[in-house]
Image (cartoon, rainbow, N blue to C red):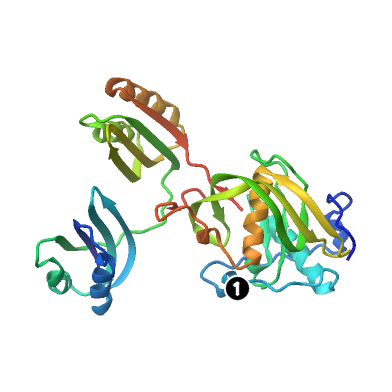
Amino acid sequence: MTAPIDDLAGWTPESLGEPGAVRAVVTAPDPVLSRAGSEVDPRDPEVVRLAADLIATMRVSPGCVGLAAPQIGVGAQVFCVDVTGHPKAVTVHGAFALCNATVVEASRWRPGREGCMSVPDLTGDVKRASRLVVEGQLPGSGVTVKFAADGFEARALQHEIDHCAGMLFLDRVAGAHAVYQRKTYL
Amino acid sequence: MQELAITVIGHDRPGIVADVAGVLAGLGANLTDSTMTRLRGHFAMTLVCTGPHAPAVEAALAPLTADGALLATVRAVQPEATGEVRGEPYLVSVHGADRLGIVAAVCRVVEEEGGNVTDLTTRLTGPLYLLIAEVDLPPDAADRLAERLREVGQRLDVEVTLRRAESDLL
């Protein structure tokens, strides 16, 4: 394996070479959300199609800034993120998809209240690192990237990496009284 | 089967939840929403379950309350629709020296501005009194409520803040 490059420059969803299909979003307690996803070959055409489907589904879902393969029923370590335009975003890498992503460094833990398309009726207070270094592979080229993310993008990445590991925000809430009925729907 | 509202409160000891939940499970009563916590050394449970008639549940809980250390009530209630969206979520935080009537005064102005308290916790630790409330507010009510809460805070000499309970969809 070659040394990871340090940014996502030059990669766009168009690099996947296909538009992707909008897929139905799976909700808890579907067991696929609680199983660790399999590692994938980022060059596999099926993985490329999966990444394109994730991006297409994220784009048609109002307010959605990230979507992981288990959320469309596929137990695989693939997700996409796009925090462009979000008021809490610090770093913004645009729309991208990653395979087999791992957290390399995490620091500056901050609380925040999260909701999830797969848990439509609840939100919860979750502490996440606001500074993060993530490593993963780009679908299509298979190139390994390693990059830093801050603030809201860091939170979104941790939320999606958790999905790929079979974890929901409910597995990380701050306490028994840190889960709430969700009151506003986009 | 009907919906039952049950409260259990008493001197805290290990096993209260297991005992009560065990009785309910033994009757086929399905514990749905509940909140349980410790209040100044008393363990308090408030729960809703679907189960058999209330007298049967009361009778089954009787052995747990016989020594007087626990108090339990069981009432049949009408099921309510859940998940109804009524307003925008806000958090009210109050802290300061304990005074009579803080909860009453704060919640009264929330009610008068059309808000609904959906969750509330108070704690008294030493001289410090703390109130955290989740409230649903009608659109455009927040600024006026914030002003009225500020007045309440001045009158009671406590700090009051109102802020949006933001959540992010990920």
Q: Under tag 1, what secondary structure?
A: loop
Q: Nearer the viewer, residue B27 or B65?
A: B65
Q: Is residue B168 visible?
A: yes
Q: Nearer the viewer, residue B59 or B69?
A: B69
Residue B169 position in % (x across, y down)? 59, 51
Q: Chain of mark 1?
A: A
Q: Is residue A152 left or right of residue B15?
A: right
Question: Eyeballing the image, is A134 above or below B121?
Answer: below
- Residue at left 28%, top 63%? B48
Residue B2 seen in the figure: no
Pick the front one: B134 or B72:
B72
Q: Residues within 10 Å of mark 1 (few under 14, many from 20)?
A: some
Q: Position of residue B104 (x, y in %)?
A: 24, 34
What residue is shown at x 20% (from left), y 30% (from top)? B100
B124 up-or-down from A146: above or below: above
Q: Which residue is mark 1?
A: A35
In this rendering, position of residue B69 left or right of residue A8 = left
Q: Amino acid at mark 1?
A: Arg
